[in-house]
Image (cartoon, rainbow, N blue to C red):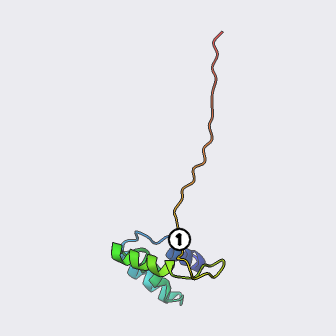
Amino acid sequence: MSDNRLIEVITTNAQGIQPEVVSIIENEIKKRNLDPDLLNSLIAQNEQHSIEDINHYVELLRNCPCPICNNTRDKLNGTIYHSIKSIIVTSITETR
């Protein structure tokens, strides 16, 4: 695996990685002389957080200035939305 591919996997797709694999990846990071902070990304993706932790981080984010207008008067608000796109295919049968 190339360095770039390894970095991509560590930083974007390491959730659910087996604990015994973490030490292998840590050794690979050292052997390839990559940024040691990559391991923090792997660990962060596999941490379990309590609802109190999540609420704490939510409040930290909500109190940040608006990234568009830099307004600090109002709290930031975020939502999750889902989008579904469907293609409807019909078939018509005819008996003569």
The residue positioned farthest toward the top in the image shown: 96
Q: Which x, y percent locates residue 16?
A: 40, 69
Q: Residues within 10 Å of mark 1 (few under 14, many from 20)?
A: few
Q: Nearer the viewer, residue 82 or 30?
A: 82
Q: Nearer the viewer, residue 87 or 54?
A: 54
Q: Is residue 86 left or right of residue 43?
A: right
State the residue at coordinates (40%, 71%): 17
| Amino acid of disc 1 | Asn
Which residue is labeled 1 in the image?
77
Q: Which x, y percent locates residue 72?
A: 57, 83
Q: Which image quarter: residue 65? A: bottom right
The residue positioned farthest toward the front in the image shown: 73
Question: In which quadrant of the rendered image does the N terminus lie?
Answer: bottom right
Vertical order, 93 against 87 (above or below):
above
Q: Is residue 58 left or right of residue 93?
A: left
Q: Which x, y percent locates residue 60?
A: 47, 81
Q: Secondary structure at mark 1?
A: loop
Q: Which x, y percent locates residue 40?
A: 45, 84
State the residue at coordinates (34%, 76%): 52
State the residue at coordinates (63%, 82%): 70
State the residue at coordinates (50%, 84%): 38
Q: How many marks?
A: 1
Question: In which quadrant of the rendered image does the C terminus lie?
Answer: top right
Vertical order, 38 against 12 (above or below):
below
